[in-house]
Amino acid sequence: MKLLKTLCASACVLAFSAVHADVTIGAVLPLTGPASGLGIPSKNAMALWPKTIGGEKINVVILDDATDPTTGAKNARRLVVENKADLIIGSVATPVALAMAAVALETKTPHFALSPVELPPGNDAWTFRLTNSNAVMAHALVKHMKSQGVKTVGFIGYNDTYGESWLKELRAATTAAGIKVGAVERFARADTSVTAQVLRITADTPDAVFVVASGSGAAMPQLALAERGYKGKVYQSQSAATRDLMRIGGKVVEGTFVVSGPAVAPEQLPASHPSKSVALSFVQAYEEQYGANSRNLFASDNFGIPLLLEKAIPQALKTAKPGTPEFRAALKAAIESVGPIPVPQGVLKFSPTDHWGFQPDGGVVLKVVNGDWKVEP
């Protein structure tokens, strides 16, 4: 009888363990290569994650994509096949996120993209964007341009999916606002000079120039514009919302306008802003760990993930156990139904037909003033 009780107790423990298996989350980030300035802060934010989410222990595996789409896809597949990842995250670099989305679709694994990757209808069935779309950012950007009296704007941006996506959204938003897009120039992420492109842009004498680049690379076109004596307004995309812009650009970037999510300067948000509280929590936790003024939107995107999973994981566990295709499907369905959830960059509300989540009015425009950010009215 005693042996029977022992066996029953052991069976109960094993059954409980089976139901409550650890959740594995795999991340693919550019820790080296041209986009490492974005990937490293994103990795730093994951170090601030709780050890358990939704009552379950979380195993996190982080791999370097080296800002290379082929490497990113290979690592995403490795996480799913070898590590049995229930969720994959990445990349901050848009071309890599695009490659990862294909793996997510093929393997039916929920995927949190940390860049505004554009995907054909249906190809994003398993991909959710954890950053504001370029359309959301363009809404705030062009609204500000119009308030500043901008009539013509030149464009210089990356010659990849991120740059082309931004150009498409810029043209759509400026057309609606009656602003003309003039000269359009492109450059590669690894380029060290854009002199020729800037010469063509300045020859067009636009009221403003919009730069689409990331991290320290965002300063290069602006420095070249200053060297050519350009005196108009300069706008930058959300990928430039880091202090690398000021560190590299120095006095030249004073007065620059940068479109961003709200997490970069939450202290300046009105008390009524739905993301103010959680964005302040992000800033406090991140800067306590990594130093004053280390905050950035790439870290904030990753910081908000546990807030979403706190609701989604328990819901998925009602259907299946982690490490199985059934759990991945249940987690996807849960992510599509648990919003709205305030995160540092806005309010997320996914649905089966909307894997962007953020609303059109989620962007803010920052101005570089005395080497710091100032939220524009």
Image: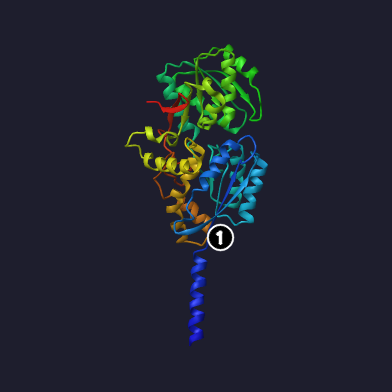
Q: Nearer the viewer, residue 286 or 229?
A: 286
Image height of 31 relative to 180, above or below: below
Q: Secondary structure at mark 1?
A: loop
Residue at 42% in and 44% down:
349
Residue at the spot of label 1: 324
Q: Is residue 246 visible?
A: yes
Along the horizontal axis of the image, is 277 left or right of 39?
left
Q: How many marks?
A: 1
Q: Amino acid at mark 1?
A: Thr
Q: Quadrant of residue 188?
A: top right
| Residue 252, horizontal then vertical, whole percent | 53, 20
As drawn, the residue found furthest toward the left would be: 272
Q: How is the image coloured?
A: rainbow
Task: Please name whichever residue, 113 or 328, is drawn nearer the observer in this view of the structure.
Answer: 113
- The residue positioned 50% from the left and 84% from the top of the image is 4
Q: Quadrant of the C terminus?
A: top left
| Residue 16: image location, x then y, percent | 48, 69
Q: Residue at x 49, y 66 (%)?
A: 19
Q: Is residue 121 visible?
A: no
Report x, y in % for residue 197.
63, 19
Q: Position of residue 23 (x, y in %)?
A: 52, 57
Q: Is residue 193 above or below residue 230?
A: below
Is the residue marked by circle 1 packed among few (<14), some (14-19), or many (20+) residues within 10 Å? few
